[in-house]
Amino acid sequence: MDNSFWAERVVLVTGAGAGIGAGVAELLTACGAMVIGVDRDNQALDAMTTHLGEDRFKPFAVSVTDSKGLQGVADLVSQSHGGLNGLVCAAGVQRYGTVDATLPETYAEVMDINVGGAFNTARVAVPLLRKRPGAAVVLVSSAQAYASQTQVAAYTASKAALLGLMKAMALDHAPEGIRVNAVCPGSIDTPMLRWAAEFFSSPEGADELVQTWGRSHPLGRVGAVREVGLAVEFLLSERASFITGADLQVDGGLTAGLAAALPEEK
C-alpha cells in the first residue's frame, strides 16, 4: 500500500459501521484517506468516529434505501471536498429461506438494501467521481453470486444481481475514467457471520459452527475483514488502473473446487 497515494483522497463507504465496511474504513483511514462513512446505525458510527478520529472519518447516519438522504450526503461531500475518489458499497443484510418460505416483504428488504442500496448510492456518487481523475468503485458481492447454499434464495439473488450492476456500470463509466469492480468474499468473520452461526446453532455453539464453515474453504478457515479490505484497497488504487468490470474472489478457494471430490487413494 502506498500511503502517499491516499493522502487527500476521499472515499465514500456504505455499511461503514460494522463488518467489511468498517474494516475498509479502518484500512483506508490508516492509509491517509478521508472516509465518508454511511450506515443506518448511529451508535456504530459514533464508535467508528471515536476509533478512527473525526479528522479522517465523517459519519452520516443514513439508510442506503433513503435516496433523498443519500443525495444530502452527496451534496455535503461536494461542498466540503469537491468530489470523490472512491466508492465502496458494503451495506447488506442476510436473510434465510427458500423461495416459497420467504415472505415478499423479506425479499423486498434484501433486494432494496443489497442491490437497491448500491444503485442508490452509486447514482448520487457518480457525478462526484467524475470530478476526480482515476476514480473507482467497488461493490461487495459474495461467493454466493456463483454458487448458492440452501435456504438463501433472496440473498443469493441479490449478490448475483450486484455482479450484473457492476458490469453495467463498468461499461457505462469507463469513458469517464471511472473503474468499477466487485469483491466476492467467502465466509468472513463479521458480526453478520456470527449472527448466522447463532441463528443455526446457539451462542454457545457459534464458535464451533464458524470453525466448521471455515474448514469448508480450501485454506481451512474463515477470512478476516482486513483480508477483504486489502482487496478493496487494491481495486481502488492505481495498482489496479487497468482493471474494470472484474469480480475478485476473496474466498479462500471456496468456489474453486467441486464438492464431489475424488478419493485420496484407489
Image: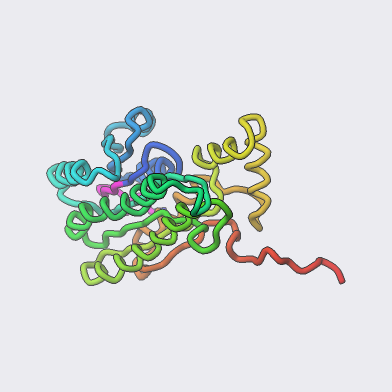
Which residues lie in the magenta part? 2-12
Q: Residue at (19%, 54%) from the top-left corner?
A: 128
- List x then y, in percent, for residue 205: 67, 34
Judge from the rendering whether residue 62 lies leftward or rightward of residue 253; answer left or right. Answer: left
What is the number of callouts on the image?
A: 0
Tell me if I can see residue 233 in this picture.
yes
Q: Is residue 82 above or below residue 194?
A: below
The magenta stretch spans residue 172: no
Q: Quadrant of the C terminus?
A: bottom right
Residue 151 image offset from top left, x and y in percent:
55, 51
Residue plotted at (35% across, 58% down) = 237
37 or 238: nearer the eye? 37
Q: Is residue 129 above or below residue 261?
A: above
Q: Quadrant of residue 217?
A: bottom right
Q: Which of the 4 image quadrants contains residue 127?
A: bottom left
* Residue beneath the point at 60% across and 65% down: 256
Picture layout, residue 257 above or below residue 98:
below
Determine whether, in the image, residue 157 is placed left or right of residue 129: right
Q: Residue furthest left?
A: 79
Q: Residue at x 36, y 57 (%)?
A: 138
Q: Quadrant of residue 161?
A: bottom left
Front residue of 167/110: it is 110
Q: Residue 233, how many percent across, how many down?
A: 40, 53
Q: Residue 101 or 169: which is nearer the viewer?
A: 101
Above or below, comparing residue 76 to residue 183 in the picture:
above
Percent position of residue 57, x then y: 30, 37
Q: Is residue 77 visible?
A: no
Q: Residue furthest front?
A: 100
Colour basis = rainbow
